[in-house]
Amino acid sequence: MQYKVLIVDDSKLARMVMAGAFRRLRPDWTLVETANADEALAAVSGGAIDIALIDFNMPGVDGLELVASIRKTHPTMPVAVVSANVQNEIIGRARELNAGFIPKPLTDDALAAFLSGAVLRLKKVAP
Amino acid sequence: MTVDPGELTEIEQDALAEIANMGVSRAASSLRQMVGEQVLLSVPSVRIVTRKAASILVERNNPKKLVAVQQSFDGPFAGRALLIFPEAQSLELVRSIVGDEHSLEDVIDLEQEALAETGNIILNGCLATIANVLHRTMRMSLPSIVRGDGAALFEVDGAASEGQFVLFLYIDFNIKKRDIHGFIALLMDLPSIAALKTIVNDFIGAIEEQPSGHVE
């Protein structure tokens, strides 16, 4: 099964690193890259996004606020906040929004673990 | 000589260096992961100095042209965190992170952006670890890039900063194989040193309250 993944990060380097990890882990999945919350919400309402990976520290709307907006229309979409801001408070707030947390620097192992869980959840919703 | 109200006792300095060490160790492990090579660290140093003295410490053994990624932080205490290295090494650092397969033009295109994200990851990791150790929450700004000498980096000429004391924490890092060195510095404003003392003493208190002896 192939999925469509939304990547939200204001840093081009961070998006390159994420795309590189997908090329190794899930080369046939489709990636949609956006640089801010507005673009991300447009992509989500455009439909067909299965999974979202969202940076926390972005200009304007931050990653947790963006997750909260996405949750209003997509309560079960697998979502992870990706950040070097590993404060317990940030990880706790992600958890309250039913989102995962992947620390930066990104590792293939951490991303692979989240994606495996996401695939299971997606199959449960639409077997 | 009167005692500076912001002065820290020896045990407070030790505790602060230890807390900084935890943050910077996290930063070094992030950097190591990003460049894929060993990163060596010095022992962290903690001082209360003027901004000018801090800028002189930074310039010692370093060329005058420096580049820094900086982030402000705010919470139980406020200040700035900086990842600093000689400007001549910034392209080499970027190259070590994006990989050698990219052309020089690509690396130059990406330099600013890659420095900001690298600083963001390293400084966030450092500050977040410190916040977690202290059981406090800190807000951090977006990263920005500053170029210039030590004085420019530490805003020595800024308004009201003349002779102003700051708590200055720094640690050197060295990426041996790449011949890249630099350092991570935290500058905290003196008005928040009183707050910092309380927090550090809570940290020391928590250690002293831990039951002694081993659990077999």
Image (cartoon, rainbow, N blue to C red):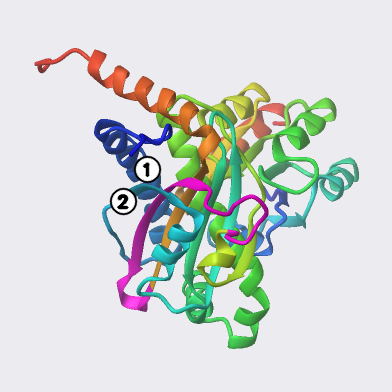
Q: Residue at x 79, y 41 (%)?
A: A61
As rendered, which of A25 and A6 lies closer to the eye? A6
Q: Residue furthest front?
A: B1
Residue A27 visible, this angle = no
Q: Position of residue B158 (x, y in %)?
A: 65, 57
First of labels 1, 2 by sequence position: 1
Residue B20's label in the rendered image is: 1
Are there few (<14), some (14-19), or many (20+) residues within 10 Å of tag 1? many
As rendered, which of B48 and B82 lies closer to the eye? B48
User: Which quarter of the picture shows residue B109?
Assistant: bottom right
Q: Position of residue B164 (x, y in %)?
A: 53, 48
Report the amino acid beneath label 2. Answer: Pro
Q: Name the residue under label 2.
A: B44
Report the amino acid beneath label 1. Answer: Ala
Are there few (<14), some (14-19), or many (20+) residues within 10 Å of tag 2? some
As rendered, which of A114 and B109 lies closer to the eye? B109
User: Which quarter of the picture shows residue B106?
Assistant: bottom right
Q: Where is residue A50 in the image (x, y as percent from the top left)?
A: 74, 42
Magenta stretch containing residue B159, yes or no?
Answer: yes
